[in-house]
Amino acid sequence: MTAVAQRRTAADRSEPSEEEPRPRRRWAVPTLVGFGLAAVLALGVLVSASNGAFAITLGDILSSIGHRIGLGGAPVEGTGESVLWNIRFPRVVLGVLVGGCLACAGALMQGMFGNPLAEPGVIGVSSGAAVGAVAAIAFGLTFAGNWTIPLCAFVAGLFTVSVVYLLSRSGGRTEVVTLVLTGVAVNGLAGALIGIFIFYADNDEITAITFWQMGSLSQATWPKILAVAPLAALGLFAAPAFARRLDLLALGERPARHLGVDVERMRLQLVVIVALLTAAAVAVSGVVGFIGLVVPHLIRMATGPGHRTLLPLSTMAGAAAIVWADLASRTIAAPAEIPLGILTALVGSPFFFWLLRRTRRRQGGWA
Amino acid sequence: MRLRSLLPRPRSLAPRPPDHADPGPVPAVPAAVTGLGVTLGGKQVLRGIDLDVRAGEVLSLVGPNGAGKSTLLAALSGDLDARDGEVALWDRPIDDWTPLDIARRRAVLPQAHRVSFPFNVRDVVEMGRAPWTGTGRGAEDEERVADALALTEADEFADRAFTSLSGGEQARVMLARVVAQDAGLVLLDEPTAALDLRHQELVGRLCRELAAEGRAVVIVLHDLDLAAAYSDRSAILAEGRIAACGTPAQVYTAERLGEVYRQPVTVEHDPGTGAPKVTPVR
């Protein structure tokens, strides 16, 4: 002890004011980014609600919201009120939900696999959940009422995460090649299963399935939101509790265990949470890829890899990204609508490619 | 087999010790193995190992490649599920402790250093404090981290990303993380492998300091001179058994080392310290 104590007094003398400023500086950037993202998200919500075939001014929107929550203001004139509350707002809220879930699931998965390329879409969990949802649509299942599709998506998603996790790990870690190839295999199988269900579906169901498969928020309604909100809320609120342990997992499984993390139990819990989040998003919006890949990566570059900031900021950024992307998807080629999934894939695929090349370079190539 | 790895580990049915946040003083024998045998991939890696780890002492494990040094260290760490014999930690079977209880008592420096994301050096060292989060000792975090960084001379690059460091620098950061964990039992697997001359000696002195604070240090080494200079006791492993265990002066004989390593050596004694110096016959 004495040696340590002597050393410390020496260090104190050379750096007299080390105590206060460091923790504050550490949280400054994430806080700033957090406020920035909140602003971008809020702006996105308002702009998205105001734009469309029937334009509603921002003033009217605020006034209508004020009216509904009893702070004065007035409803929008004519059909505007109905458009705003029955079409635009459900869609925006769903966008926030889907984006937040996907980005959070991506960040969790990357931490869990210790691999920046893990993402629900890439490794096939989204397609797996989609199989469950498509099965529910194609066979007209209604055993759980409104919750049937989300529930089926969750069960199928849970199964897929578990399978991918078991197949792509060896010796306590996940090689990039194994992970991506497992994703290819799972996506292939899921595509085939969805194909079979489509084969047995009738025409109306085929249209529903096809459009939904490309990823879109156009089917948004309040009941749908209520159907997936419990899954999403459960996942999103549980996620931050794992932040510290995910940091430790970056050291590898054994070192994390050496620091007191019950890795086995945490793994089980994370598999369930990732399935919850992915299923919540997929059940209502189809497969919207790459959000879980791009968003956490950008946040990591901006505020560092610590999961205590990464998880909440990714969730916010994912929500903002989807809200703005959805706005683009329905205004770029108006009155036609480009499916959201296609738009995110257009941006996300090149990014994925770049990330893949970079990871490969760092690891000195893959045999 | 894989499926089983997903399920929670079964623990022994003996009544579990209460979850003490504070492990208390280091007992005289913080860890011990009796009759330890380990089979990995069909090969008997360790057999019939009896070893006490004593507080206030640096114990080095030496021996040729594949002799079972790292496996013995893994057994002391609580990493091995499949084994014969007893491994005790703080006078209880190690399987009776939760991972968190164990983490408050022993720290491990693994051979390979890897961090998946570009965490700062300081962040990595702070991870060593994780077992103490929410306990009374959590208040010491900042102090312990600063000390650990200073002791390993890692403070000069404390704000750089771990992934941008050289191998030797990474090794020192990981050592700092282990020191920051403030455990009574410190297990180091080849901490000097990637280090230059100065930092090898620094690790040796650090081990002595840790032992002087009343901790037990177990260190796997390839450099016999380093082991001789800094350890109180040295266990020579060969083919999964302990060939000899005692003070370096007792056990480092030319005859025994030549036989164990299958390489003739001469052993002289340092005129200053009296520690044996081993030179291969060339």
Image (cartoon, rainbow, N blue to C red):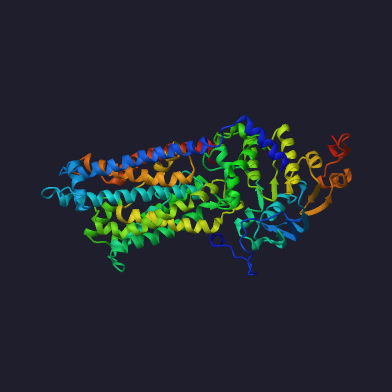
Q: In this view, does A14 lie above or below A117?
A: above
Question: Residue A12: which quarter of the image?
Answer: top right
Give the farthest residue toward the left.
A78
Question: Residue A1: which quarter of the image?
Answer: top right
Number of marks in the image? 0
- Residue at 84% of width from left, 38% of height from top? B278
Compare residues A142 and B102 and report the one nearer the observer. B102
Split into 4 quadrants, where in the image is the C terminus of chain B?
top right
Residue A196 visible in this rendered orientation of the protein = no
Compare residues B215 and A21 and report the one nearer the observer. A21
Residue A285 visible in this rendered orientation of the protein = yes
Q: Is residue A284 left or right of residue B156?
A: left
Give the farthest residue toward the top.
A14
Compare residues A327 and B138 and report the one nearer the observer. B138
Split into 4 quadrants, where in the image is the N terminus of chain B?
bottom right
Compare residues A115 and A263 and report the one nearer the observer. A263
Question: Residue A278: which quarter of the image?
Answer: bottom left
On the image, the x and y values in percent for residue A270 come to 47, 55
On the image, the x and y values in percent for residue A178 come to 50, 48
- Residue at 69% of width from left, 40% of height from top? A4
Q: In this view, does A28 lie to the left or right of A86?
A: right
On the image, the x and y values in percent for residue A185 come to 44, 52
Q: Is residue B208 left or right of residue A284?
A: right
- Residue at 36% of width from left, 43% of height from top? A317
On the image, the x and y values in percent for residue A41 come to 31, 42
Q: Is residue B267 above or below residue A200?
A: above
